Each structure stands twice: as structure tokens, then as C-alpha cells.
Image: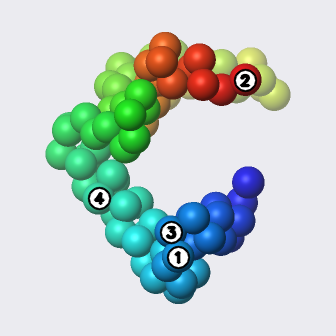
Amino acid sequence: MKKADFIKKIAEKTGFTQKDTKVVVGAIREIVIEALNNDDDIQVIDGVKLSRKYMAERQSRNPQTGEAITVPAKHAPKCKFANSFKELVR
């Protein structure tokens, strides 16, 4: 499902306009990014938890040349689903 389809479905279920829904979805995105950058976990909906994970510096290889390269340390987003949520998806 693309973002436009997602916004359309939310608008249909809530009775909001697609324009208003697009603003709300954009605000949610900004809030999630801000929370993750502040190292806060966020539970978007019941059973879905977003967090960030620290990934240490590591050695890797360039697949074309075989040359060893260093991948710098970084934070990566992480999404965890509760079993109760997993059971709802068939």
C-alpha cells in the first residue's frame, strides 16, 4: 500500500478529508522521528513498538573489489511486533 492509498483509507474510515489526513500523517512522522532521535521508544499502535538500535562500527568487504572497508557506527530504527499483534495478521 502506498502512502496515498494509506491516507485515502484513513480518510474513509474517519470521515476526515484527505488533505487533513495527510497533515496528521505528516505530523505523526515528525513526532516519531523526533522521539527516536531523543532515544525514546514509541508505541504507535497496540502491539507495535518503534525504537532505535545502536550499531557499532564494523568491518565489511566491497563485493566488487573484495577490499576491506569500515562501516561507521550508527543508530538504526527498529520495529518490534507483539505476539498479540502478530496473531491478528493472517
Label drawn at residue 14: 3
Q: Residue sitting at 60 percent across and 25 percent down?
A: 88
State the separation of the CA atoms marked 4 and 2.
Answer: 30 Å
Along the polypeptide, which appears first: circle 3 or circle 2? 3
Q: CA distance from mark 4 to mark 3?
A: 21 Å
Quarter that holds the N terminus: bottom right
Which of the two marks, 1 or 2, is nearer to us in this view?
1
Label drawn at residue 31: 4
Q: Is residue 74 visible?
A: no
The answer to whether marks 3 and 1 mark residues whose Cβ atoms lie closer than 8 Å is: yes
Tag 3: residue type? Thr
Residue 35, above or below 19: above
**Residue wearing tag 1:** 15
Left or right, 54 with respect to 67, comes to: left
Provide residue 72's location: percent of width, then percent of height. Answer: 41, 31
Q: Nearer the viewer, mark 1 or mark 4?
A: 1
